[in-house]
Image (cartoon, rainbow, N blue to C red):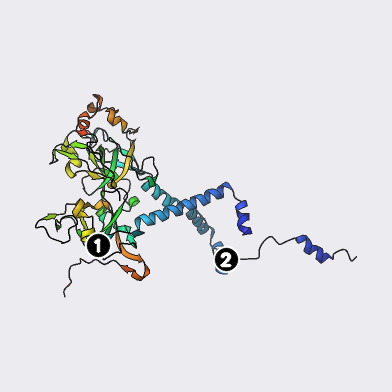
Amino acid sequence: MGKYASIEQQKELSKGPRLTSRWHLPSAFSRLRERYASLPSPVRRTCRMLRIFGPLLPISLFFSEHVAQIMWVKGPSMTPYLNEDYDQMHTKSDMVLVSMWPWGWTLPWQRSKTLERGTIVTFRTERKNEHIDQLANFMNFRSPANSSHIAIKRVIGLPGDRITTREPCMKPSQIVPYNHIWLEGDAEDPRRTLDSNTYGPVSISLITGRVVGVVGPRMRWLDWRNWEAGKIDGSSPDIQQGNYRQSVRDRVEKEVVQLEHPEF
Amino acid sequence: MERFIRSILRTTPSRVARVAINGTGAFCACVLVWEHLVTIQLSEGPSMYPTFNPRGDWLLISRMHRNGKGIEVGDVVRFNHPTFLGVHGAKRVLGMPGDFVCRDQPYSTVAGGQPDMIQVPEGHAFLVGDNLPWSRDSRTFGPVPLGLINGKIIARVWPPSKMEWVQNTMKPAELD
């Protein structure tokens, strides 16, 4: 009998090494869990839903600020490219998709904003009669009383270009300085657009986004290469005759000054 | 430790998705707080010398004053540099829209050395560093659009011996 273990000893052996630790959470925490479990089930269900949808709120805010946003174009400054039939219907406004990723297809730390002549950009301005409406003011945490406004214009000149200006501008020509761009509206009549001819070259740091497409009423993608070629699709007579806004492109002398990037 | 390993071994796609969405949400919330409420940043450079150390100070920046909201004359603001891409500057506001300021030469050592003044245009602010001969500011590049201002510097948080609120030194005198 001596070589067989007693029943108690056998039980002890069959357990093997203990796999789960006896360590418990602090009692305050477990008491909280108990109190939560004793809540009525509708409350618990709401809590569970909040737990699921809570992270989605910052994600969507982040998306609208850094990835893409929907905006509405107001006013005649981009007619006939955007707001095509402004002359017939003043209330209708185009809904555009704005890419808020200002670095184009590069990575943020490379710090090279890809801007081309003909791109349509949105930028911050202090003028009140400007031409874009935001999806919702609260999405940008901007109070309407003291907001800075978002305007939409086309990039005409890049740093180093010489622009022959048009009517409201007081100088006959202007060389665009480093880190600035020349923006103009597409309207034929200079009185219908408030652009760089009024307030001069705009700092690239003020640019908030790039318009990549029109969502409604007529859906289409916008490509800056169509600007250099002068070919866009549309029904207005300005567009139909071809070579869209060649007069504007003729006023730009490209890369007159070679600007070196100053070291900081 | 053992519990932790077991919980890892028990992963299912739904758990992975849940951790991913929670992590992304936390990251986005941090970014939103950083961009809309407060930022802490190291500031270097001699342009604000008696106020900030040229060797570097950690500053607490309130981002609620973005786009020149609630900025007054005398506040120290952080702004996107108008001529260098991706660079921030810290300067004191000398004039708000409509104010008249002396048009000094760049890097001049005296204030008001020139006889003429300019009016700050609508939607712009005139920013000047505290260390006049060592500051590249509105005397060089002109009034700055309010849209470039992205915060107001409210305190210095590091080094701890010099922890203090940043004072608005240009408040009008109060007389009883």
Dots 1, 2 in contact, CB < 8 A: no
| Amino acid type, residue under disc 1 in the picture | Asp
User: Alpha-carbon distance for marks 1 and 2?
Assistant: 50 Å
- Camera-side residue: A256 or A83? A256
Quarter of the figure with residue B37 = bottom left
Q: Is residue A234 visible?
A: no
Residue B157 at what x, y percent from top left?
A: 36, 66
Q: Chain of mark 2?
A: A
Q: Position of residue A69 (x, y in %)?
A: 35, 44
Task: Residue under label 1, please give it.
Answer: B75
Seen from the viewer's position, the closer of residues A250 and A238 is A250
Q: Which residue is mark 2?
A: A30
Q: Nearer the viewer, residue B45 or A62?
A: B45
- In the image, residue B51 sits, relative to residue A232, either above or below, namely below
Q: Is residue B60 above or below residue A170?
A: below
Q: Secondary structure at mark 1?
A: loop
Residue in view at x 43 percent, y 50 percent: A59
Q: From this viewpoint, is residue A248 visible? A: yes
Q: How many marks?
A: 2
Disc 1: CA contacts within 10 A as few (<14), some (14-19) or many (>=20): many
Q: Which numbered dot is residue B35?
A: none
Dot 2: what SS? helix
> Residue A36 at what x, y percent from top left?
54, 63
**For the residue carrying disc 2, how many other residues have a C-alpha within 10 Å: few (<14), some (14-19), or many (20+)?**
few
